[in-house]
Image (spheres, grey):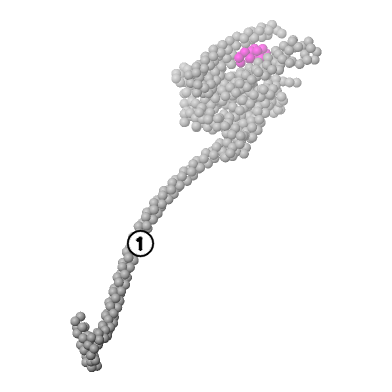
Amino acid sequence: MNVKGPEILFEIPVLGGIPITETIFNGWLVVAAISIVCFFLGRNLSVRNPSKRQIVAEKLVLTLSGLVENTMGKNNMFFLPYIGALFSYSILSSLSGLLGLRAPTGDINTTVGFALIAFFLIQFFNIKNKGVLGWLKGFTEPVAFLTPLNIISEIANPISMAFRHFGNIASGIVITGLIYGALAGLSKVVLGWIPVIGSIPFLQAGLPAILSIYFDVFTSFLQAYIISMLTMVYVGSANEANQ
Amino acid sequence: MEKFQEFVAIAPWTMIFTWVNLIILVLIMKKLLFKPVLNMLAARDKEVNEMYSKAETAQSSAEALEKEYSEKLSLAKEEAAKIMKDAKHDATLRGEEIVGEAKKEASAILEKAQKEIEREKEAAINEIKGDIANIAVDIAQKVIEKDLHEKDHERLVEEFIDGWGEDK
Amino acid sequence: MEMTEAIVRAASAVGAGLSMIAGIGPGIGQGYAAGKAAEAVGRQPEAKGDITSTMLFGCAVAESTGIYGLVVAMILLFANPLIK
């Protein structure tokens, strides 16, 4: 059994060929889905007598804004849409695995993308709040010979963020693939002697669904929460000087 | 011919498309979800605050009205008491006046009656005087049985009466 | 298949297995964290929500090393840079 990366669906023949992979295409689907949900939720809001749909929208927005305010502080509330976008993109990407799509978060480039945004935001706010010299000096603290370690730990943050998210989702993909392969083999061994029914891998029904509840649903929620939380904590602590 | 990327490989275009997706998503969520909902929540807060301030002003005005009314009520009570007192006073005065007038009238009537009585009495006395004279003449005629001279007769009577009247 | 490639593949498979030893650390750590969280819930049942979310967050961060091992194992098995 061979675990492959995302399939290249087609190539746009500009700039030496832009490969449109499953990751990118499913990402578009996720963006479209979130846009539709947002359009549906944010429509016809009334101050009095909110509908059930509006109560859901309010609850979502208030929960998220409470989380952002608690974690990042009031001066970072302009991050609310980014955190919302990151959380919803991450969670729907991971959950799209349930629909048989290849989860975009199961591609390391997506999660590295998330992590690099957080990394650049952290460095941007450090430079903005301390100045270039203060930012550079920050690496030599507390002692000058720790500079390489500081730089490594600074770079390790986005890498660990990216690998954590990617590893969880990709391991789900791999393990689901392995279990499907194994169950196909098992049902061939057990039921293969029956002429017509033997060609259908019956054992593939049932067990993978239960496992996917852990590997897809639970992990999806947890990893979306973790990456949003870590982004908020790191960026919030980089931008708390002007509180 | 299906082509696959490596399981773990850096693909810059995927990363760029992820960023583009995220930016689009940020703009869409901001425009379609966060901005309307937060605006609505702010409007609701504003309305609730307005309602509270309205209720407070209404309450304070109601309290002021109540105070005013109670003041007016006590004033009215006072006035009523005053009016009652005045009326009583007036009535007493008037009563006294009436009583006084009545008394006066009564005394006038009394006086008039007395005068009348006096006059009646005088008239009666005069009448009686005449009667007595006649009776006396009759008696004298009878007693004397003497046919006096008419002249003598009249003189005698006059003398008698004058004497009687002087006696009195 | 050349001999060298076969050796590299075999060694990579062994290496992938060895790299998964990294799973021991997070396992112990997460078990410890979960135990402490259970203790905390027992002591303060009203803070169950906060404790659970904090524990999950801590667990997910502590899981990093295990995930590194997993990623290394997956790279060795499915995207081996040593085989060209």
- In-front residue for pair B161/C43: B161
Q: Amino acid at mark 1?
A: Ala
- Residue A195 position in % (x across, y down): 80, 13
How many numbered marks have been drawn onto this rendered protein structure?
1
| Highlighted range, magenta | C70-84
- In-front residue for pair A20/B31: B31
Dominant secondary structure of the magenta stretch? helix
- In-front residue for pair A166/B164: B164
Residue positioned 26% across, 80% down in the render:
B125
Residue A58 in view here = yes
- On screen, residue A207 versus residue A156, left or right, reads right
Name the residue carrying label 1.
Answer: B91
Residue positioned 19% across, 81% down in the render:
B167
Query: From the viewer's perspective, is residue A111 above or below residue B34?
Result: above
- Residue B126 position in % (x across, y down): 27, 82
Tag 1, which secondary structure? helix
Residue positioned 28% across, 83% down in the render:
B131
